[in-house]
Image (cartoon, helix red, strand yellow):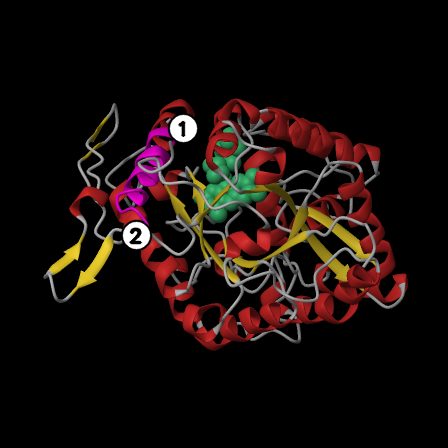
Amino acid sequence: MSARRQISLGLSMRYLGYHAAAWRHPSADPAAASKYCHFLRIAQTAEAAKFDMVFLADGIGLRTKDEPPGALCRSHQTAELEPLTLLSALAPMTRHIGLVATASTTYNEPFHIARKWASLDHISGGRAGWNIVTSWSEAEAWNFNRDRHMDHETRYERAGEFVEVVKGLWDSWEADAMLHDKSSGLFFDQAKLHVLGHQGKHFKVRGPLTVKRTPQGRPVLVQAGASDQGLEIAARSAEVVYSAAHHLDAARAYYADLKSRLAKYGREPEHLKIMPGITLFIGRTEAEAREKFDLLNALVAPEIGLSYLYGQMGDLSGHDLDGPVPEPPNPLVKSMARNLLALARRDSLTIRELYTTIAAGFGGRVLVGTPEQIVDDMEEWVVAGAADGFNICPPVLPLGLDEFVELVIPELRRRGMFRTEYAGPTLRENLGVPMPPNRYTAT
Ligand SMILES: Cc1cc2nc3c(=O)[nH]c(=O)nc-3n(C[C@H](O)[C@H](O)[C@H](O)COP(=O)(O)O)c2cc1C
């Protein structure tokens, strides 16, 4: 084994993959995102390849808008399964791979989240993770008794308190609280059960939790959000952060900023793994990779493509798609419209080319190349201090995962960058992050 640092790998498996036209790919079963067997096959493939975890992003409302008209009925980002239910069903069918689901602090109660994720940690033998998000769309507010989404400040204030309550509930039972002593009749040691008694601005939660301490002490905490408040929650509590950086310099700055925040919470930099998302088009030759990229991009219906620009630049459907990107007629988000326009001008992109660059990875970072080129890029980010691993977001599932396993994993292993065996049965052991002490026993 070389002295190179080993990386962590997560697999994002939402929908049919991270390309807007994934469902139209010749290999895709368009109905698969609602089929258990689709996810079982993916999770088992990822586990055989020794991925750290599978991950489900989530939203709790139909966020896709019919803008321009005709976009909604062409979108596969519309129908899916509820993540925690799905991961619970995958747990007994897998043995090592981490199971990470997203849940919103804006539209849940801490007791519910603490209880459900603690249960998944028991069911899976210590492989559960919670991706903490605050949600961002009005469509979600409408499903939870609200007309408008909560403002950013309030959402994050609530999120900060929410996470502390959940962690407090997970400490309710000390690890050795259960006695199960049939002769004395004592089921547990009452001195080792703790009532949280939380009373704060957003929550009043007595506790204790009705699930005992979990195999990982508590499930792995994951965070995705780039604001200052999001970074503080991550620095204080998260073991994994999914970042959305596109450029190495920005990714390095983000990495250094986030890692520098850990010390004030008594944490070491390696206690948190930063994993940027990447969507990969992999070919044995550059030409083959480019062919795969072009094939999918050609399947992006104009309505869908334009919908990716609509939120920032307004309606461009009256323009020639193969002509230059115009000054946005009605920019809804001015700064983002300016960025998109600057990108289009810099690379002389047409409207169609601009929207396919976004549609190719749902706005995330996209790499097109051979396994060597892709691993060169991954290694560059790790060596430069911009990433501890990557969240792989295949353009089409399961094909993109199969190609990654067949072509990229061997190259990672050849360079000593990825494991050949799991370190242990829990997600924490495989990520190499410590088990948290129970606040009532840590002195
Ligand atoms: C890489 C990444 C993944 C995210 N995944 C989700 C998700 O699955 N569900 C969700 O509701 N929000 C998701 N978000 C949104 C964040 O939770 C957050 O609401 C949003 O980024 C705004 O917060 P911020 O200002 O801290 O970035 C994600 C954000 C990033 C950067």
Helix, strand or loop: magenta stretch: helix
Mark 1 beta carbon near ligand 1 (under 8 Å) = yes
**Residue appearing at x 48%, y 30% in the figure:** 236
Q: Nearer the viewer, mark 2 or mark 1?
A: 2
| Secondary structure beneath label 1 | helix
Which one is in front, 229 or 263?
263
Compute the Cα span from label 2 to label 1.
34 Å
In the image, taking residue 399 as reference, residue 95 lies left or right, namely left
Q: Are marks 2 and 1 in contact (CB under 8 Å)?
A: no
Crowd tier of the residue under label 2, counting other residues whose Cα lies within 10 Å: few below 14, some 14–19, many 20 or above: few
Q: For residue 67, say whether it is visible.
A: no
Q: Is residue 114 visible?
A: yes
User: Picture quarter containing residue 401?
Assistant: bottom right
Q: Position of residue 428 (x, y in %)?
A: 52, 52
Q: Residue furthest left?
A: 185
Left or right: residue 223 versus residue 113 is right
Q: Residue at x 58, y 34 (%)?
A: 312
The label shown at residue 156 is: 1
- Magenta range: 160-175
Give the residue type at disc 2. Answer: Asp
Q: For this rendering, which residue is in front, 363 or 211?
A: 211
Disc 1: CA contacts within 10 A as few (<14), some (14-19) or many (>=20): many
Residue 443 relative to residue 319: left or right: left
> Residue 155 location, x and y as percent?
37, 29
Q: Which mark is residue 176?
A: 2
Image-quadrant location for residue 341 = top right
The amino acid sitting under disc 1 is Tyr
Which label's residue is closer to the chain start, 2 or 1? 1
Taking the magenta stretch, the answer to whether it contains residue 169 is: yes
